[in-house]
Image (cartoon, helix red, strand yellow):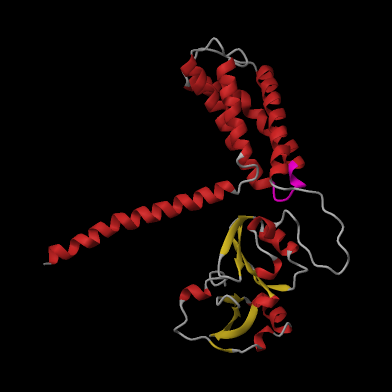
Amino acid sequence: MASKLAFPADRARPAAGKATFANRVRRFANAVSRLPGFPLLWISSAAAAVLAIVTGAFNTGQIPLGQRSLFWMLVLGWNLVKWQTWFAFTVRKPSDWTRASLAGFLLNLTLPLETLAAIRIVGLDATTGALGTWLYALVISIVLFAVIWAAKSRMGFVRQVPIPAGIATVAQDGLLARAGVAQDALVAIQAEDHYCRVHRRDGSSALIHYRFADALMEVAKLGGQQVHRGAWVAASACCGAVRDGRRWRLRLSDGRLVAVSASYLAAVRSRGWLRRNSSTISASVPQSAVALGGARP
């Protein structure tokens, strides 16, 4: 009987493992899709590789097709990784594109060494000059500039129009716009490494590649308060406060509890948020309800 009972558990383990793997793949795909310039940067790099392979660009036409294909995939693939990583760390708002692109030309300084490495990997007996390598790097970079401007148009980066004084607004290309969250639906913003999780009133959330400091600047006029080094709460979403030992937690309109750190306790108290239906937290409250801000004392 014991051996029979073990089979369902054994079959459940692979299913759980597959679900975990699928969730990780989904999270990775979502993170990649939010990279600055994706997918146009990737598409243009692939197109440039195909064009270079077919035309035998920069005197590579004499190389056999297989080796030529591998050579260009190595060179352009590695440069794609460099540029995409560079933009991921340097582009946070539309005005960053030009500065990041110009500074990114420094990435091409190592291209002669990378080209020689690719030649050795594909098994060719050839050499290349630094000047010639930098020349075709300049051509590739000009193409990248075209892609950058195309990416800016695709991401909806538009010129800001004047807004009458006294009306709160957020950047049209900012965190809330990228998350697809209206101002009146915003509950809280939570920092997660280099990302911000935007919580909505319906209980859903969106994880966006965005600096928390920039997010705080964006929502400064929306009527809210930073309550933790990694958490901001909208004033309209605060429904009460509860005591958790010596600490306070705010109860939000979506049911979650947000920890208030000692650094921001005075600011929260001055808003009167701690007087709204204050009580002592119960041991029956699930841990998931206190996750926002709870991991950072």
Q: Is residue 114 visible?
A: no
Is 104 left, or right, of 43 in this rendering?
right
| The image quarter in which residue 226 lies | bottom right
Q: Is residue 98 above or below residue 182?
A: above
What x and y, as percent, mark residue 71?
Answer: 52, 22
Q: Is residue 274 visible?
A: yes
Magenta stretch bounds = 91-97
Furthest residue to the left? 1
Predominant SS along the magenta part: loop
Residue at 68% over, 22% down? 134
What x and y, as percent, mark residue 141?
Answer: 69, 29
Residue at 54% over, 12% down? 126
What x and y, as percent, mark residue 179?
Answer: 64, 58
Q: Is residue 262 above or below residue 210?
A: below
Residue at 66% over, 68% down? 186
| The image quarter in which residue 85 lies | top right
Judge whether residue 174 is colored magenta: no
